[in-house]
Image (cartoon, coloured by chain):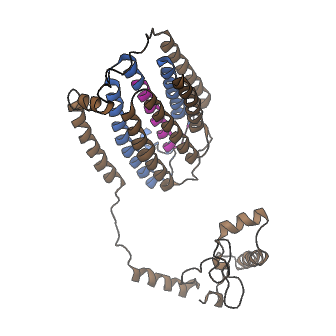
Amino acid sequence: MGESITFWVLAVVSVAAALGLVFSRRAVYSALMLGVVMFSLAVLYAVQDAPFLAAVQIIVYTGAVMMLFLFVLMLVGVDSSDSLVETIRGQRFWAIVAGLGFAVLLGLGIGNAALTAPVGLADANAGGNVPALAALIFTRHVFAFEVTSALLITAALGAMVLAHRERTEPKPTQKDLSRARFVLFGQTGKNPAPLPGPGTYAQHNAIDMPAMLPDGTVSPLSVNRVVARYEASEGKLAPEVERILQEETVSERANGNGARPHGEEDGE
Amino acid sequence: MTTHYLVLSALLFAIGGVGVLVRRNAIVVFMCVELMLNACNLAFVTFARQNGNLDGQVIAFFVMIVAAAEVVIGLAIIVTIFRTRRSASVDDASLLKY
């Protein structure tokens, strides 16, 4: 009884999460959905007398593999959403038809197979699941086990070779970077100093608070443009910040180039 | 009860297969492959219970090891392709076709 309840709850959850994995637009949602599927499968393993595999599933899959997926997702760019243009006409429709057909075929095959009542693992697990598995892995499957170690080392080396990039030019030192900054300052007047932090000179240190200059005005350099755009769309942007940003866009249009006018306001 | 587990595993496998066919983002395609591997593992564990010996669980364990190695290499390849093409879409890596 307890097993059926667990099964039905987890079956619904995992199928729903798998559908979410396939059909959600954002890759990060897909990754989270995959995590849900893996976690529910781990519980199903535990229910089916496989506690060792349940632990390995959580450690290897929801721990390491999902971490790797999310890491690469952040590296490659979270906002690189899928293009919805079909390159092959009718591909999506036929793929779904093929998937449904395959599921029906497999389901019918399983339904037709005359499965007797399961033998159960009570005998095999008599001395504990982990010792029984260890006895199998280190006797009958010991060669496969040794080969997997070679496989893992090859995979680690392969990942290092693939991800490594040879540096073709010397690494710029701090001196070079500083020189380049001041050359740019001489040419375009770009402020060579670091940007002022938000709210450093005001009463708040929240990211959306602009820094105050010594004369009490707002430093537009410290305003985070993404936050400002969001707050403007919500109608919560502070009026003085809005005024500064508007002046800035007007002067940018007047100058015709992207270089923002910096003057004595940058003095720290 | 084991039939239910097998049907669930078949469903997850089919969903993963549809995902591989439908999605364009290489990372999501890869996640769907992982989903298919997981579905196979569920079938292996279920058969171990059905037949009363632990070989199915050992095979599932080996599948997990191979899947971990595969994820490492696959993601490294995706990162390499992204570096040269600035895109993770499977449609863009078609240079070998011509």
The brown chain is A
Front-lying residue, A55 or A61: A55
Looking at the picture, does residue B64 appear above or below residue A32?
Answer: above
Residue A73 drawn in magenta = no
The image quadrant of residue A118 is: top left
- The residue sitting at 44% across, 38% down in the picture is B97
Looking at the picture, does residue A224 appear above or below residue A263?
Answer: above
| Residue A265 rendering spot, x and y as whole percentages | 65, 88
Report the predominant secondary structure element of the magenta stretch: helix
| Residue A138 rendering spot, x and y as whole percentages | 21, 32
Front-lying residue, A79 or A179: A79
Front-lying residue, A8 or A75: A8
**On-image quarter of the C terminus of chain A:** bottom right
| Chain B shade in the render | blue
| Residue B2 rendering spot, x and y as whole percentages | 47, 19
Residue B36 drawn in magenta = yes
Q: On the rendered structure, is B35 left or right of B55?
A: right
The mark tally for this picture is: 0
Q: Which residues are magenta?
A: B23-44
Residue B86 visible in the shown view:
no
**On-image quarter of the N terminus of chain A:** top right
The image quadrant of residue A135 is: top left
Front-lying residue, B81 or A78: A78
Q: On the rendered structure, is A127 left or right of A79?
A: left
Looking at the picture, does residue A204 appear above or below residue A49?
Answer: below
Q: On the rendered structure, is B41 left or right of B32?
A: left
- The residue sitting at 55% across, 53% down in the picture is A78
| Residue A143 rendering spot, x and y as whole percentages | 20, 32
Residue A84 visible in the shown view:
yes
